Image: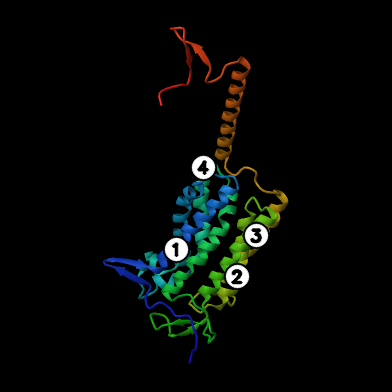
Amino acid sequence: MDLAYIPSPSTGVIHLGPIPLRGYAFCIIIGVFVAVWYGNRRWIARGGTAGTVADIAVWAVPFGLVGGRLYHVITDYQLYFSEGENWVDAFKIWEGGLGIWGAIALGAVGAWIGCRRRGIPLPAYADAIAPGIALAQAIGRWGNWFNQELYGRPTDLPWALKITEGANREAGTYHPTFLYESLWCIGVALLVVWADRRFKLGHGRAFALYVAAYCAGRGWIEYMRVDEAHHVLGLRLNVWTAIVVFLLAVTYIVVSSRLRPGREEIVEPKAEEKEEKVEGLEKAGESDASADTESGTAPDAVDLGKDGKDVEHGAGKS
């Protein structure tokens, strides 16, 4: 008898009249908003302007969703294109199935397009949004809880996840790998924020640290999962992906720190030009005021009117 466990929702969708409200979609949407909000704060702190992160996210988010879905469908093609399966289900993104590897890869392409349009270096933008992406993943993983998917091996631990009988799943208590990854992603976000403040990471190294730290956790969490997956040399495909991407991220950190040490001084040229223009106007105003003082005139100087009376400039009816 299980004395304690984490219950699963009886359904992942609630119908508001004819409109279905899906928990998986809500988690993704909330995660995106958190990533943009926190990324905007970090971007402003780096010297950028408010709204830039959201403008670029308009490109990055759709690309990321398409990339995530493509990765899932390609690596789990048997779920959609095998005999007896309906290929139309490949487009039903609300039922779950987003590969983070594809989401980050294609999302980076969208971010590159947005950055190029704004004249912003992609590495600086990536550094700013890195912790926000980790937090978005932490929130998004709860969508798997709503769908009762991507759990681990059977267990009787007090924090086991209760899974009910359903299509392609057996009732029982399993390791809540969605929870493990959610907590790990929160830890990754905190690590990146701390390291960025401590070492002043720049030129994409904060983002690379996020990638490396996430892969380190994804490797052992993926190893615990029991859902169907392709295996290569006895390991799940995503475990190999995590290993390869981890090595690439660490290599980038080492090489980048040697070739381009320090952090970018200017992350958004337009913001810098705006500051210089404001400073120029302030100096021009100070120069005009100084010239008026030296010539003996003032904004409220007294002048002689046509009728011989003193007229005080600047006075008017109240």
Which residue is found at the position 53% from the left and 58% from the top?
Answer: 105
- Bin the neighbour count of mark 2 within 10 Å (Cα to Cα): few under 14, some 14-19, many 20 and up: some
Earlier-in-chain disc, 4 versus 3: 4
Marks 3/1 in contact by CB < 8 Å: the verdict is no
Mark 4 belongs to which amino acid? Answer: Arg
Amino acid beneath label 1: Ile
Which of the numbered marks, if any, corresponds to residue 261?
none
Query: Can residue 129 be seen from the camera position used here?
Result: yes
Left or right: residue 52 compared with residue 261:
left
Q: Which residue is mark 1?
A: 28
The answer to whether residue 12 is above or below residue 317 is below
User: Which element is circle 4 on?
Assistant: helix
Disc on the earlier residue, 1 or 2: 1
Q: Residue 79 at x, y = what percent?
A: 41, 73
Badge 3: how crowded within 10 Å, few (<14), some, or many (20+)?
few
Circle nearer the viewer, 1 or 2: 1
| Left or right for 212, reference 143 | right
User: Which residue does the image show at 58% across and 30% down from the upper left?
Assistant: 282
**Mark 1 / mark 4, whichever is N-terminal:** 1
Percent position of residue 199, x then y: 70, 55
Task: Pick out the residue farthest to the right.
Answer: 258
User: What residue would you read off at disc 2?
Assistant: 217
For mark 3, give the secondary structure. helix
Q: Is residue 277 left or right of residue 251?
A: left
The CA distance from mark 1 to mark 2 is 20 Å
The numbered dot on residue 194 is 3
Q: Which residue is mark 4?
A: 118
Secondary structure state at the residue bearing disc 1: helix
For the residues bearing labels 4 and 3, Cβ distance under 8 angstroms: no
Q: Disc 3 to disc 2, how far (Cα)?
A: 18 Å
